[in-house]
Amino acid sequence: MKITSISQQQKNKERYNIFVAGKYLFSVDEVVLTKYQLFKDRELNESELAEIQEEDAIRRGLNKAIQYLAHRVRSEKEIRTHLAKAEMEPDEISLVIQRLAEMKYINDLEFAHLYVRTQVNTTSKGPRQIERELVTKGITREYIEEALVDFKEDTQLENAVKLATKIVNRSRKSAKRQLQQKLITELIQKGYTTDIAKEASSIALEDFSEEQEQDVLGEQLGKLLQRNRRLGPAKCRQKTITSLLQKGFSYDTIQDYMREHELDFEEEQD
């Protein structure tokens, strides 16, 4: 078959339409056009045509991948997934990945290091959460372990304390014991180890004074009395104390507060 004409596409100046016998046959990237020396009157056999079209598919995949990488660094798995969504064939995707690696656009170890540093500096995530995210991005265990070395233990504690302090500031109406358990639980869920979570929660609660605990207890007690007084003295006392225990106040603390404030449930019912 003979190429009868070639025209540049209007919307994409880097692609060219190839015509045979006056009819559109296929289009190619400018790089492919040059590589295979495609010009008017050039003769093409079936084997050459298949090779050109395969090369163009790879080139289009390469362009898609580079555009995808323009927004941020990606892992190999992320790029494969992106190209698969563009309906590229698996063998073509592998060739694109190979080209990207040769061009140094892909390096999963460098990606892992950069990802860890970014998460450490911009989020409150612990190492285990970052590890889980890297696994979903297709990074090997070996690379993950190497990259997580960047997340030093002192930085982990510092970030955990910052997060714990934020939680304390929005949970001022909780008993200290309950609040400490809440901190430990949330820090572990964020990917910190139990040891780091416990140490960070203790540091964040250093300024949580006994006076604050008493104020919180008094506020909660007042609300419960107002809600339970219709039950009668005995049930009101039982239900109120039970609710306070569930909120993290110790039985002795509750009893001391009631004695100190001379709280009489009989009188409360009048």
Image: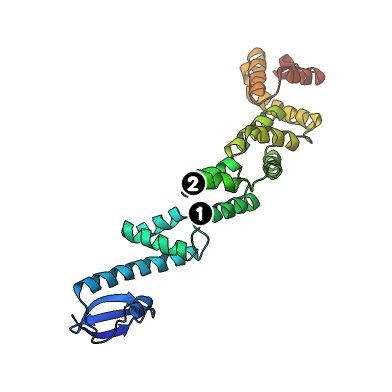
| Residue 244 showing in the rendered view | yes
Q: Identify residue for label 1.
A: 108
**Residue 18 vs residue 93: left or right?**
left
For badge 2, the amino acid type reads: Thr
Residue 79 picture quarter: bottom left
Q: Is residue 205 above or below residue 6?
A: above
Residue 175 picture quarter: top right
Pick the residue in front: 21 or 32. Answer: 32
Q: Residue at x 63, y 32 (%)?
A: 194
Q: Report the disc number at residue 140.
A: 2
The quadrant of the picture occupied by the N terminus is bottom left
Pick the residue in front: 268 or 160. Answer: 160
| SS assignment at label 1 | helix
Q: Is residue 224 above or below residue 143?
A: above
Instruction: From the top left corner, tell me how far across and down residue 167 is, in percent.
Output: 67, 40
Residue 191 picture quarter: top right
